[in-house]
Amino acid sequence: YGAGTEVVFACGGGIYTSAVDAAKKVGAKVIGVDVDQAGVIKAYAEEDGMTVTSAMKGLAATVNSVLSAIKDGNWATYSGQIQNLGLVSGTDPSVNYVGLPSSTQWADGFTEADYNKLVADVFSGAITVSNDTAAEPEVTNATVDYQGNIK
């Protein structure tokens, strides 16, 4: 944060604490991961408004899908397999396997309606997301210090 970074995405569950400690010193923000971390970040930081959003796994959608498959006799659809789950709806973000929480701080001209349109565009293919880890992404309106693939 000391070099001007405004927001850090602390991707790794409990590692958010070090990002929160650093953010708190300079009045910066963090992005949570896995679930809506706004509550735990607020409790840890002892202040409100530090979490911009969280990149959430759709745990409810995943559990509902698997339990429905088991109930319907389709356990083989999931058993012993690795599944890549993502968007299954362009109109109802709550049923997707990834998303943003309702506690997201919609601001700076990016609204919940913009988010819903973004989801719809990704779902329809109007916007594509690359999983190519060999190429650095092209970015605009941001300074990125690309550290490569950390393993």
Image: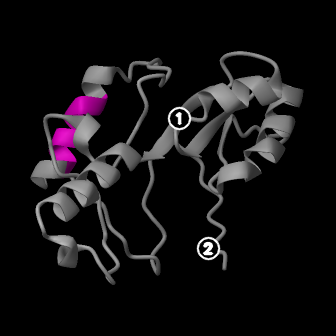
For the question of whether residue 126 can be seen, the reply is no
Residue name at image x 19 percent, y 55 percent: 68
Task: Tell me which amino acid carries mark 1.
Answer: Asp
Mark 2, secondary structure of its residue: loop
Tell me the number on the disc at residue 148: 2
In the rendered image, the residue lying farthest to the right is 25
Asked if the magenta segment contains residue 130, the reply would be no
Q: Residue 89, how many percent across, how many down?
A: 15, 45
Q: Residue 147, how many percent across, how many down?
A: 66, 68
For the question of whether residue 76 can be seen, the reply is yes
Residue name at image x 26 percent, y 46 percent: 96
Mark 1, secondary structure of its residue: loop
Which corner quadrant holds the C terminus? Answer: bottom right
Which corner quadrant holds the N terminus? Answer: top right
The residue stretch that appears in magenta:
115-122
Tell me the number on the disc at residue 36: 1
Task: Tell me which amino acid carries mark 2.
Answer: Gly
